Amino acid sequence: MKIKVPAGVDNGTKMRFGDMDIVFNVARTSKFIREGADIFSEITVNIPQLVLGDIFEVETVQEKVKVRVPPGTQPGSLVKLKGKGVSRLGAAGRGDHYVRVNLNVPQHPSKEEKQLYEELKNLSSKKKSWF
């Protein structure tokens, strides 16, 4: 017997096919977390990428897409990819895909990197503050 599984089925969804009741178990993946029709994933970026902004390739449940992380993005921020989540069961449209932006702070910067960070620190301390 072949059963066509509708798009958007979630873990624990129950459906009746003929005289059978079927409960679905949806496999988990380490790439995505699913909440309803929405998907969550993460990218890890470095300090210059957060300060200056950058474009990243992100895998969604459908395809790989380019994501723009704007300049000044804060660590832990979410970037929303509208309509790139899972199909809604029994409804039109798809959920959204949210990408959490994590910061990778170098644990062992090179001598040159340390020098550049010192220069940035000195420049930042020269800026006038409101407080």
Image (cartoon, rainbow, N blue to C red):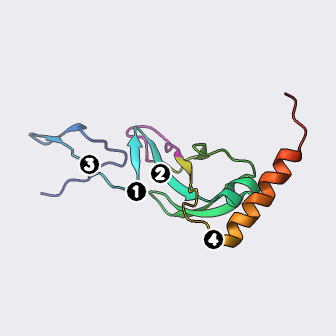
Residue appearing at x 54%, y 60% in the figure: 107
The answer to which quarter of the image holds residue 129 is top right
Label whose residue precedes the other's in the sequence (4 or 2): 2
Contact, CB < 8 Å: mark 4 with mark 1?
no
Magenta residues?
86-97
Residue appearing at x 80%, y 60% in the figure: 119
Disc 2 target residue: 41
Label whose residue precedes the other's in the sequence (3 or 1): 3
Foreground of the two, 76 or 121: 121
Residue appearing at x 66%, y 44% in the figure: 74
Left or right: where does residue 127 sit relative to residue 103?
A: right
Residue 31 — which label? 1
Contact, CB < 8 Å: mark 3 with mark 1?
no
Question: Nearer the viewer's eye, disc 3 or disc 4?
Answer: 4
Total residue callouts: 4
Contact, CB < 8 Å: mark 3 with mark 4?
no
Q: Is residue 51 above or below residue 10?
A: below
* Residue at the far top in the pictured view: 131
Disc 3 target residue: 26
Disc 4 target residue: 110
Contact, CB < 8 Å: mark 4 with mark 2?
no
Q: Which residue type carries mark 3?
A: Val
The answer to whether residue 115 is magenta is no
